Image (cartoon, helix red, strand yellow):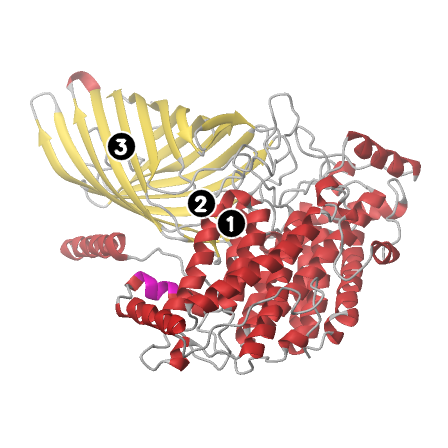
Amino acid sequence: MKSKFYSHILYAILLTTVCITSCDKSIEFSEQLTPLNPTNLDPDAATWSMVLMTSPDQIAVPAPTDVTSDAYKAELASIKDAQSKLTKSQQQTIDYWSGGGVLRWNQIFRGLVARYNLPPAPKADGTYPAPDAENPFADPMFPFANPPYAARAYSYVTATIYDALKAGWHYKYLYNRPSPSKVDDAIQALAPESDLPAYPSEAAVMSGAAAEMLKLLFPASLEEITRMAADQRNAALWSGKASSSDISAGLALGKAVAALFIARARTDGMGAAGGNKAIWEALKLNASSRGDEPWVSLETPPRPPMLPLFNKVLPWKMTYDQIVAIRPPAPPLRGSAEMDAECAEVKYYTDNLTRERLSIVHKWADGAGTYSPPGHWNDIAAEHIRDAGFSEVRAARAFALLNMTMHNAAVACWDTKYFYFNARPTQLVPAIKTGTGIPNFPAYVSGHSTFSASAAEFLSYLFPAHSGDFEAMASEASMSRLYGGIHYRKDCEGGLVLGKDVGKHIVETFAKLDGAD
Amino acid sequence: MSASVCGQTLTDGLMMPKKNLCTGFMYTHDQWTEYWEGELKRDNGNVGKVTTQSLMWVGNYGITNRVNIIAMLPYIKTKASMGTLHGMEGVQDLSLGVKYNFFHKKFEKSAFNTFAVLNFSTPLSDYTPDFFPLSIGTQTTNITYRLTTYFKIEKGWFVNASGGYTWRSNTTLDRPSYFNGNEFFISDEVKMPNVFDLFVSLGYIKNGLQVELNYMQQNTLGGGDIRRQDMPFVSNRMNSIKVGALVMYYLPKPKHLALRASTAFTVDGRNMGQTTTLMGGALYTIQFQKNQ
């Protein structure tokens, strides 16, 4: 008996020792990308409606040299040389980018938003410093990628990639230069080979478009962004997909298209969206003159409201007047029986914060240090886009239109929030303790609900077979804010309606008419 | 070793005799207002004073005079005095350990003992690890290897030193991605660094009285720092150095009942609160067999 006991202990020690030395704790990403090999190359993509460019040939791309020229042969020789000395890490770079450039940039982008989604710390005097684009490495770092900032950023980067790729497609099928691995049998295709013409390289177009936009939006991550962009171009070269002239033409095109979008971004109203003290006071007065309790920050020390003039930031394919036209009706006033009932319901949920509901709150919280609610919907969309096997340009369309929709949702939601400027549940009932942090802006309508419904509306158009899933997710995301004590039911329901309206606008007036279906 | 001594922790140098069970409850009150955000010490008006209370059942059973089984199960409740965040509470982790007195040498007036401890702990409830500083734990399964030396000097004085290495399983969040302070992950699984700890105590134990001063150090072997103004994260590099004192008194009557009180104060830390801890408890010894 005794010896058996000791042998059990010995066995446990051995087992756990093995675990210490060999149990693998490394984390595998749940969003795995397999080599992209689209069945439909979308040769007509250049005819699809542009987002910002006036035409696919707005930026000129000169004709390439002939594949029989000495210059091109020298390019092929250098690819052969590179392939003959390919290292393991270079092979990994090829494998990484063969999962699809559009999807990869989306993953990288979500990581950047999560890294920069951090509010500035208060100064000793209780005020908050503003992040400064001219000094991005300082404390506070620039930017604070909060939900509106993130929504706008996602839309700019994805729309730039989309327009740039359509322009790229135009020249690809205009010049019809095959890929190096098709021209020369001695060059291996180390990533899936297709009949997509190589000039200009789509990988280089993307790398230029994505990197230029990301450097504008996340200047302190210049080094990482530049390295990823160079990797993408190198992967195209080493894999036999593109020659150096395919790549340089693509890079120049991508950068030139980015310059058009950067010019728009500099004048789209974002610079003034933070407002100033006079504006913050006027918002209070607005709410109290309606007979409501004006919003106050629940942070200590109180923080100025987040981007109160974001409603004036330019929407995509929609006008400010169209945004105002769908603004939801006023929320119930403080002290009304209706508002008392709303508060009581929130109090009920926070007093009964079950584990099941808390997990829903945390699943959708998407607060500080995360990729934000628009990022969550990019996450949801990415697996559908991957599974659909879209060409790069069609994947770019999906992300661009999704993020343009969510940018518009942010504008519309912020318009409503600051028009009514009403209090969060905890401001009216301090005993309401929340299951996640309370965002620093007014309650009505819920941002999560607006973003989610707008995204679900667009994704349902794109993947109609999954529309039920998208709607269920949007509804869960919306209710998570009530469960967590962040929002009244009215905020959630109003946000869902507003988001759906915004989503419908892009679907009906742009997506269905752009020639891609 | 006196039969009335109630060994009850994984780090001490005391053993329960064969077929004796020492069991009871400990109440712990722990609070902090200042914490280390990485290495920057600060307070935060959005949490104010964070209080953690726990009620823990402990049991230590002597399988033989040399082999003890120690079990613990706490119920924990957290609360922030300011801000809006909801406190958490629940049954935390069941801990089960085997303590083996593998070396024992008696001198004329002193004694030297060494112990090996293998401890296993695992969550008994589905509490969230994703709500620090108010989460009640890390929701990990842990295995600790510990070596303890206990030197009993003359006239009841003793010195005890114990070092432990804890392997921690990864933990799972309710969300599909996260940023750990350094890197972004598209996964709900978080890699958890292992932990090293050191415990040294110096004290007196005689005639039913045990008093000691102690030093406790915990170093997380990896993990990121809390960034400026960020929330803490479950896999942060949580380090601390605490000093404390303990008194345990075996009542003359009722026999076999001991009262225990201790305190500890965090003198240095990283990604943790500067805690002040008070603990009180009562332990009762049941003899299933008369001690030889």
Amino acid type at image mark 3 = Asp
Q: In the picture shown, does residue B281 fall above or below A337?
A: above
Q: Is residue A99 visible?
A: yes
- Distance between the alpha carbons at the discs numbered 3 and 1: 29 Å
Q: Secondary structure at mark 3?
A: loop
Q: Chain of mark 2?
A: B
Q: Secondary structure at mark 1?
A: loop
Q: Which residues are magenta?
A: A89-93
In primary-sequence order, the first of circles 1 and 2 is 1
Residue positioned 58% across, 53% down in the render: A213
Mark identifier at residue A45: none
User: Could you say which is closer to the camera, residue A307 or residue A302?
Assistant: A307
Q: Callout 1: residue from which chain?
A: B
Q: What residue occupies the far front of the structure in this picture?
A: A70
Q: Which residue is mark 2?
A: B182
Q: Are marks 1 and 2 on the same chain?
A: yes
Residue tagged by mark 3?
B12
Q: Which residue is mark 1?
A: B127
Residue A342 or residue A474, whichever sits in front: A474
Label 1 sits on what residue type?
Answer: Tyr
Specify whether residue A206 is painted magenta.
no
x and y, in percent, of residue B140 in the image: 41, 50
Quadrant where the N terminus of chain B sits is: top left
What's the residue at 53%, 64% (across, down)? A205
| Quarter of the image where the C terminus of chain B is located | top left
Question: Does the magenta stretch mainly form a helix, a strand or a loop?
Answer: helix
